[in-house]
């Protein structure tokens, strides 16, 4: 019995001997992150830095390095009416818009349809398996439907012939790489794709009961047209998270997202007015005033967090506008 | 302001707790809770309980809007229930709509949250951090230069001059003295509605809306406490009064309970 067990573990020491000192340190850090993700993140935030090198948004340091880099590329999918590819750091979303013809509803016979959908396939993250859409994909699609359906594209502009023929725009976003904050990236991709859409000229022939479309660039009298967009209602989303009740993290990554206790989303229009905001959780704890009435502490805490998020979002909006409009 | 609410504890026999709630004259939702109960191995969590919320519309199978409402409710309830107290268990909520709900609007989500809170109070088996009450607020555009009005949105009927609408949920929990209960806003969903021109909202607007919501939520909370007091009244009266009176009252209360149960059986 004694001779079977041996104290040496030759495999571990052999692997380690192939790694340099820096790689060994990195391996230790990665192991620590896996075993104690909360403490790992907390240690970084105490030094006022985030694991990917960005700054946190505290009072002295409200610069724009708290946000990840945004890259937008439109029009690359030629088989779609409009398309966009957005990279928000490592989060990558590609969105295509397909325009089809259908009959409008009886109740709204002069309106077309806008159908946004987000797909989270298994290739974007180990969190997702193949099969029917997960809860997260359904909730994302529903949220985007709410935001986009609020009038950015007037549905009456999609009508070809009242009661007979209308455009339906299928806006499909697929997440290629999931690294947190998919809502912001998907919304940006959908907005850019819709701005890129070019609809062929369509006419409804009552005698034939058919809609005839003209191929773009084939007839100068019947050109393709861009979508009519209400500029005041174009949404831009900015998401934040709060970790451990005290650190405000703009644009959280996937590893940070799972540790947040509060998530805040602010949706601005192009003029920096707030279109919608949602906060789930209690916000940053700033209870340094025990003398006040107990009911007041939480009040100042909530007002404070939201006000900071709103001002940060407005600053960030200016940068995003350059990206969206300079394409 | 006195709110028009209808709230009651229900008597579903196969679950741990159930309740009905509605803004206006009719109950909008019937919620049941079972927990802590056995959990599937796949959804078991080693150090906390698992919460499952199922939202069912009156007609049709649940769609994406039900799913979204369920996700919101789960997040809100995770703040209300002390999850660490019962690890490796399941707390299951089923929210059944009693009125047609083609769109899950803000006031319906508020009603759902209140209904879940009531069913938790009815069950008594799940440890709670506090009581969460939610209300939906609308902002009406000012009439001839007056300030905009904020009022509680009770029914689904369209409201004229509607500029913005939103839902706020508050967690009421005990503090040092029993008179002042701290409330913190744990869910906010505020968005402007579009009727022609886009009337956006700003920070002061949000703060004012939240204040109105806070006092309205406190009223909902008071009504919940009243409901519990009514249910417990026979026992409370017994302590204070003579035994003879108490036995009469107990018989009366029991009779009333039986009658109430009969009435409830006729759903």
Image: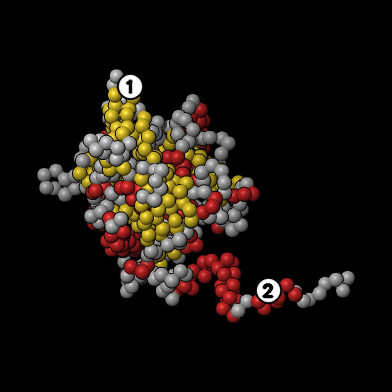
Between A120 and A76, the one lying in front of the other is: A76
| Res. A209 mark | 1
Mark 1 neighbour class, 10 Å CA radius: few under 14, some 14 to 19, many 20 or more: few
Chain letter of mark 1 equals A
Q: Secondary structure at mark 2?
A: helix
- Tag 1's secondary structure? loop
Q: Is residue A325 above or below residue A213?
A: below
Q: What's the coloring here? A: secondary structure
Q: Quadrant of the N terminus of chain B?
A: top left
Q: Are marks 2 and 1 on the same chain?
A: yes
In the displayed structure, does residue A63 sit left or right of residue A85?
A: left
One can see residue B16 in this view: yes
The outermost residue toward the left is B144
Give the x, y percent position of residue B87. Answer: 59, 55
Across and down, in percent, residue B140 comes to: 21, 44
Q: Position of residue A138 (x, y in %)?
A: 46, 44
* Front in this rendered view, residue B95 or A259: A259
Above or below: residue A61 compared with residue A219: below
Relative horizontal placement of residue A171, taking residue B49 as reference (left or right): left
| Residue A274 visible to the viewer | no
Q: Nearer the viewer, mark 2 or mark 1?
A: 1
Could you say which disc has been placed on residue A15 in the image?
2
Q: Is residue B102 left or right of residue A111?
A: right
């Amino acid at each position: 019995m004694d001779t079977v067990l041996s104290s040496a573990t030759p495999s571990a020491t052999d692997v380690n001997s192939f790694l340099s000192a820096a790689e060994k340190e990195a391996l230790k850090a990665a192991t620590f992150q896996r075993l104690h993700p909360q403490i790992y993140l907390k240690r970084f935030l105490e030094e006022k830095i985030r694991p990917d090198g960005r700054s946190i948004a505290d009072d002295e340091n409200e610069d724009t390095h708290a946000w990840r880099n945004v890259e937008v590329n439109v029009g690359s999918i030629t088989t779609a009416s409009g398309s966009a590819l957005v990279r928000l750091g490592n989060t990558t979303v590609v969105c295509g818009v397909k325009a089809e013809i259908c009959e409008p509803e009886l109740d709204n016979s002069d309106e077309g349809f806008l159908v946004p959908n987000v797909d989270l396939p298994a290739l974007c993250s180990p969190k997702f398996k193949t099969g029917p859409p997960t809860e997260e994909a359904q909730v994302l699609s529903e949220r985007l439907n709410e935001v986009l359906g609020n009038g950015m594209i007037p549905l009456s502009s999609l009508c070809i012939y009242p009661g007979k023929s209308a455009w339906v725009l299928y806006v499909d976003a697929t997440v290629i790489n999931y690294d947190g904050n998919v809502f912001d990236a998907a919304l940006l991709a959908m907005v850019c794709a819709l701005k890129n859409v070019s609809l062929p000229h369509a006419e409804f022939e009552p005698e034939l009961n058919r809609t005839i479309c003209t191929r773009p660039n084939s007839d100068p009298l019947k050109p393709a047209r861009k979508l009519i967009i209400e500029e005041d209602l174009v949404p831009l989303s900015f998401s934040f998270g709060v970790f451990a009740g005290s650190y405000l993290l703009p644009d959280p990554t996937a590893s940070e997202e799972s540790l947040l206790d509060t998530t805040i989303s602010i949706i601005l229009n192009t003029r920096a007015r707030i279109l919608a905001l949602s906060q789930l959780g209690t916000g940053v704890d700033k209870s340094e005033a025990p003398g006040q009435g107990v009911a007041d502490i939480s009040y100042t805490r909530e007002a404070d967090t939201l006000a900071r998020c709103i001002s940060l979002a407005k600053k960030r909006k200016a940068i995003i506008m350059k990206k969206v409009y300079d394409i | 302001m006195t709110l028009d609410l209808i709230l009651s504890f229900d008597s579903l026999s196969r679950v741990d707790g159930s309740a009905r709630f509605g803004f206006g004259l009719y109950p909008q939702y019937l919620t049941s809770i079972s927990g802590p109960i056995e959990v599937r191995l796949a959804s078991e969590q080693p150090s906390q309980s698992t919460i499952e919320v199922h939202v069912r519309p009156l007609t049709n199978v649940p769609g994406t809007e039900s799913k979204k409402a369920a996700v919101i409710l789960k997040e809100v309830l995770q703040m209300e229930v002390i999850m660490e107290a019962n690890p490796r268990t399941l707390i299951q909520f089923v929210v059944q709509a009693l009125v047609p709900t083609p769109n899950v609007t803000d006031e319906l989500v508020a009603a759902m949250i209140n209904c879940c809170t009531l069913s938790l109070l009815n069950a008594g088996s799940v440890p709670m951090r506090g009581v969460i009450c939610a209300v939906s607020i609308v902002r009406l555009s000012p009439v001839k230069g007056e300030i905009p009005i904020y009022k509680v949105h009770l029914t689904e009927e369209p409201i004229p001059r509607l500029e913005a609408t939103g839902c706020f949920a508050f967690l009421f929990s005990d503090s040092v003295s029993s008179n002042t209960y701290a409330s913190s806003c744990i869910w906010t969903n505020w968005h402007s509605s579009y009727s022609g021109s886009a009337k956006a909202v700003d920070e002061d607007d949000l703060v004012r809306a939240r204040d109105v919501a806070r006092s309205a939520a406190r009223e909902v909370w008071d009504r919940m406490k009243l409901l519990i007091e009514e249910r417990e009244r026979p026992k409370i009266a017994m302590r204070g009064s003579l035994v003879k009176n108490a036995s009469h009252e107990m018989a009366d209360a029991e009779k009333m309970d039986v009658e109430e149960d009969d009435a409830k059986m006729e759903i």
